[in-house]
Amino acid sequence: ASNHIPGHSILNTQEGLFGALNKYSKRFGTSKLECFNVEKFKPTTWDLTNKKECEDFFKRLAKAEDDTMISFIKRVSIDSEGKETFRPVNEAEESNLMKLFDQGKKCGSVNESHYIEKFINNPLLVNGRKFEMRVYMLIASTHPFIAYYHDGHARVSPYKYDASAGEKGSMLSSYSEQ
């Protein structure tokens, strides 16, 4: 069955969902919406195809102080099932980005899709492992309002978490990477 809500596909990926939330918060501001602050439930994200965001990222990258800890992660692509190409931005990846974007001078001209997120080095863990929870809600009708809820599930990484190791397996709880 297909979804009959126009424009629903934007909500199927993290980039689409958080892009829409960012546009919403910029358009309406967060001061009027006390309960809505994207930064409270999602790390800062930079879309390197966007010139302004790309330039901001390279400024932040230049200020990153602690070389022993991962400060950023790079998501090359993510689909609606959570399958992703993901890399910690370690020294080698940082060097690749600096070369590809010519230290930020090519922002706006590189057509490859790169999303960078601020890495959370001290996440909430379950028995020393990263986890994620998924719940599901179906809005069947808006007039009258009818919604169905399902508890979903939790996914726990099989690897102990160690941010300093830069090991991808310990940083994810996705099925696609395990």
Image (cartoon, rainbow, N blue to C red):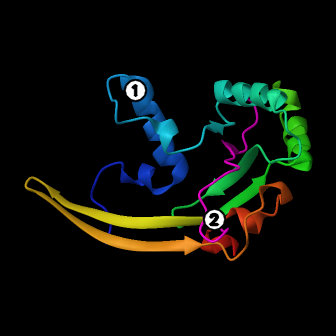
Question: On residue 30, which mark appears?
Answer: 1
Q: Is residue 94 visible?
A: yes
- Amino acid at the residue labelled 1: Thr
Q: Is residue 81 left or right of residue 174?
A: left
Q: CA distance from mark 1 to mark 2?
A: 30 Å
Q: Main secondary structure of the magenta part?
A: loop
Q: Is residue 57 left or right of residue 126?
A: right
Residue 137 screen position, x and y as percent: 30, 63
Ranked by sequence position, the earlier of labels 1 and 2 is 1
Is 77 covered by the magenta stretch? no
Seen in the picture, residue 138 relative to 24 is either above or below; the reply is: below
Q: Quadrant of the N terminus?
A: bottom left
- Amino acid at the residue labelled 2: Lys
Q: How many labels, in total?
A: 2
Q: Which residue is mark 2?
A: 130
Measuring 52% from the left and 37% from the top, which residue is drawn there? 39
Which of discs 1 and 2 lies nearer the camera? The answer is 2
Pick the residue in front: 72 or 16.
72
Chain part drawn in magenta: 108-130
Seen in the picture, residue 115 relative to 136 is either above or below; the reply is: above
